[in-house]
Amino acid sequence: MTKSFSIVSPDKLAADRYAGLTTESWRWLGTTALIVLVALLPFALSNYHVFELTMVMIYAIAVLGLNILTGYNGQISLGHGGFFAVGAYTTAILMHHYAVPYWATLPPAALICFVLGVLFGLPALRFEGPYLALVTLAMAVATPQVLKYFDNWTGGQQGLNLVKPSPPAALGIDRDRWLYFITLLVLLLAIRVAANLLHGRTGRALVAIRDHPIAAAAMGIDTARYKTLAFGTSTLFTGVAGALSAIVIGFVAPESFTLFLSISFLVGSAIGGIATIGGAIVGGIFIQFVPNLANDISDAAPSALYGVAMLLFMYAMPHGVVGTLGPLLTRSMLRIQARWPALIGK
Amino acid sequence: MHELLQQIFSGLAAGAVYASVALALVMIYRATDLVNFAQGEMAMFSTYIAWSLVTVGLPFWAAFLITLVASFLGGMAIERIIIRPVENAPVLAAVIVTIGLGLIFNSLAGWFYSYTVQDFPSPFPDRPLFGALMTTQELGVVGVTLVMLTLLFLFFRFTKTGLAMRAAAQNPESARLCGIPVGRMLAIGWGLAAAIGATAGIMVAPVLFLDPYMMSGVLLYAFAGALLGGISSPVGALVGGVIVGVTENLVGTYLIPTQLKLTVALALIILVLVFRPNGLFGTAIVRRV
Amino acid sequence: MAPILELHRLKAFYGQSEVVHGMDVAVEEGGMTVLLGANGAGKTTTLRAICGMVRSEGEIRFAGEQLERRTTEQIAGLGVAHVPEGRGTFMALTVEENLRLGGYTRAGRPDADIQRMYGYFPILAARQHQQAGSLSGGEQQMLAIARALMMGPRLLVLDEPSFGLAPRIVEEIFNIVDRIRREEHVSVLLVEQNASLALELADHAYLLETGYVVTSGSAKALADDPQIRRSYLGY
């Protein structure tokens, strides 16, 4: 008489344990393969393409910041271009006026943007929907004007030129690839932080606040604190992206940080999928490549093509690429799992 | 003192334009819970249509009327074809669609009509009135706006379709149960909003001069004005638009160099909103738990 | 008397879930039929299916027309007036404007019809120009019914008209509805939780439970059957 209390026979248990990789393992495998691919990619591409991919990653970090706010917290921001600019100019001013090494400018940029975001988030608590959109819009619109105004710091209309960083000689790679890897590192870090934040208690609180704010408050969730922190974290991410952009491009000027940039971030966020982390990367790709593609196709009306692209994406995938394809992928995996349990175990 | 009054009247004329566009925004928002970010570009495109008609020799008011009708039909078509697919999608998707639509109009205008700044004829002679307190142009703009608003008011208050549209905006399900074709009402709403925008564009073009970016500033101020008044209130849109117009003008003249004018104006509006988060005439969004 | 409304093997869905599982219901022309049952029995969903407001399968025949693939507006235009749960009044509009909206599908001026409605519900005449939202619950219910009648319907569909109202008002409303049925030659399909009053006035009754019809018959038979009364209707 066996002493097992399980209702499943021991043989079956053993079989399950070795029946193929779990979905967890597959996901881990897929992610690692992706990272390896991304790490090897710059050595197969030209300098310019490497630069483009670096910009994709920078935009992805920025959009990830926006996703934290819009997707998980339900607050719409039309002003993240402004925070991007703050990060960029923090780096630029520190490097240009105080000869701070490029890597050392990232923490101050992050901190300043975080504080700014929290300060912004506090009055933003009072606003909802289109009213919040206006407040953030004001930020986006004010930024280039303010930047031009304080021209002894910011270089005014002309902007500031920055010395592009040199890669450590020991590594033997050139500048473009060095910047690529730094950005990749920051992106992976950002994704890790965002995932931890959003898949844990904080994330659940944010979603609760987004979907049922009154119920959330009734359950004792400090709505104000979470919303403000969400704002600050969101702007921190976007600010760091801005700082990186200044380092990678080597130049800042007010004209780079107009309302159009804020709108681009929002568009990228929506197209990727607002409440997703993977969507930020899709968004980054969209922002970097689609306008350029449109320019290549049409000399006369490239923005029209960009607009049409936006429309088509929203018609086909209103929840964004990752928002729509994600559940599809999960369903496919479940179907494969049902059909061939040897391939994907539980 | 004289100059102050002059600036106030100037602001009123600008405010009339902002109020019109704000009204268009509020109309669409009430019907579909959506801010139409393409409103300005649609108005700009309509203005170009009017401009081409005038350029080929049509008298101003004929061109004006034809443009209004064309804009109305265009607005209806846009709702049916462009907006309908995302009406039941998440709001953000619809927002992106309107942003994309704005880009398309802007780009097409630049393509068809080039980016060169054009003169736009005004039906009103630019003569000073009332001892140089205001110009005929300014009075004309305010006058046309008032006529348009009166017609709209009469339409919504006293016609069957106007009533049906108000019902469809407030409670689409009940409206359907009364046999009201809600989809068609939405399309008419967009058509009217487009016609209102066209009027605003044509009124402001002689002053701002016509180019594809003419309405971007106007849209911004109109949006701020609509929110200041309360995004769900048509009266609020009008009051808000006028306040924004006058404030912008006074701030630009007396307080701040043009560089920071927009920033300061927006800051002031936001300050008001901090105390009245739903706008001056807006009602708080009632949420069911 | 031929039935004016027939539901044949009707299935209705609330989102993805099927909540009505193949229902057969008939409403006699000129008569009053009531659907009874507890909460969640599928009564409201059935009514919504008739008016094309939820996904459904099966047959819905109304005065010789098939209703299945039609939109809510079309069904209203065919002569089905639905007073929904919660009344569905246009709160921000006046009483008179609400009534006018009821007459949207009719040609000609609604003024004569509106006066007739004031005849049935004098209290509404007194409140003509008031905002509908400021009316009491009972008055709003009267307004909703009057608005439905403005359509000149052949079938009046009422979803829980007694909800949230004091018994005296409920009786008043039900009496008026019965009077309307006779004078306007309108058939009535009624959903009610207040079984006793409904069974007094109705001709036929169906008892629903979790999406199925468990019993049907003349209202009198259901009212008199003590077992049914005790088990399902609680008295």
Image (cartoon, coloured by chain):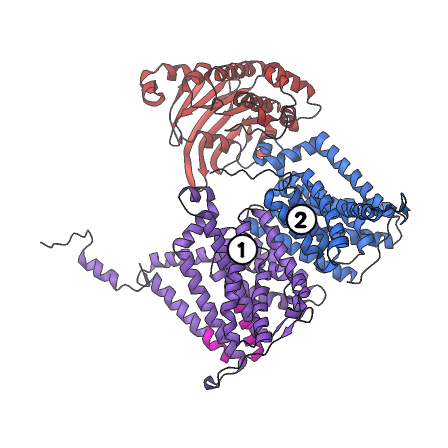
Chain colours: A purple, B blue, C red
Which residue is found at the position 44% from the left and 61% from the top?
Answer: A194
- Tag of residue A13: none
**Which amino acid, mark 2?**
Phe
Image height check: is C178 above or below A87? above
Q: Which amino acid does label 1 sit on?
A: Leu
Kindly tell me whether residue A120 is visible in this rendering.
yes
On the image, the x and y values in percent for residue B240 come to 69, 43
Q: In which quarter of the image is the C terminus of chain C?
A: top left
**Across the whole image, how many numbered discs are drawn on residues?**
2
Res A80 → quadrant: bottom right
Occupied quadrant, residue A13 = bottom left
Q: Which is in the foreground here, disc 2 or disc 1?
A: 1
- Seen as rendered, the residue at the extreme left is A1
**How far is the residue under mark 2 from the one under mark 1?**
24 Å
Residue at which label 1 appears = A119
Dot 2 corresponds to which residue? Answer: B223
Query: Toward the viewer: C71 or B172?
Result: B172
Residue A48 covered by magenta stretch: yes
Q: In this view, does A171 lie to the left or right of C77?
A: left
Observer-nearest of B35 and C75: B35
